[in-house]
Amino acid sequence: MFFCSQWSIGKVIDFAASLASLRNDNNRFTAKKLRLCHMTSGEALPLDHSLEAWIAKEDCPLYNGGNVILEYLNEEEQFLKNVDSYLE
């Protein structure tokens, strides 16, 4: 999938969930939220940041055409526990 670099992370999640027919309850108070995570660091990207801001980061940027992880996380989780397991 490809996304506009000016979109917020929240909009990217909504768009990807819709295309992939994934349950997206991010607007509801539920246990798990669909989050976009950095492929290298495992960090759950803040919903209000833009893709453009993450592409421009000097330390650990996203890459145009690179991979990201879409995963359900609890509200308090800010990082994936084992990023390497997504590469297997």
Image (spheres, rainbow, N blue to C red):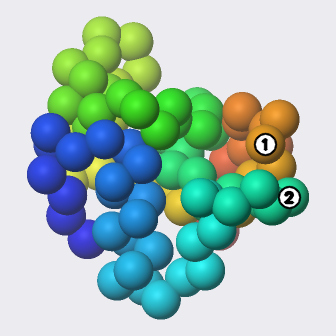
Q: Residue at x 79, y 42 (%)?
A: 75
- Residue carrying label 1: 75
Residue situated in front as seen by the camera: 66 or 53 = 53
68 horizontally vs 52: left or right: right
Return the x and y of residue 83 as percentages of the image width and height: 68, 48
Residue situated in front as seen by the camera: 33 or 80 = 33
Q: Residue at x 61, y 80 (%)?
A: 23
| Secondary structure beneath label 2 | loop
Return the x and y of residue 64 as percentages of the image width and height: 18, 45
Q: Closer to the N terminus: mark 2 or mark 1?
A: 2
Say above or below: 87 vs 22. Answer: above
The amino acid sitting under disc 1 is Glu
Residue 77 appears in the rendering: yes
Q: Please say if the residues under marks 2 and 1 sit with CB atoms less than 8 Å apart.
A: yes
Residue 71 appears in the rendering: no
Q: Quarter-wise, where is residue 56 in the image?
A: top left
Task: Report the residue that reaches farthest toward the front.
Answer: 28
Return the x and y of residue 14 as percentages of the image width and height: 41, 65
Q: Residue at x 51, y 32 (%)?
A: 46
11 horizontally vs 43: left or right: left
Q: Which mark is residue 31?
A: 2
| Secondary structure beneath label 1 | loop
Q: Residues within 10 Å of mark 2 (few under 14, many from 20)?
A: few
Q: Quarter of the image containing the C terminus?
A: bottom right
The amino acid sitting under disc 2 is Ala
Task: Report the residue that reaches farthest toward the top.
Answer: 58
Q: Residues within 10 Å of mark 1 (few under 14, many from 20)?
A: few
Q: CA distance from mark 2 to mark 1?
A: 7 Å
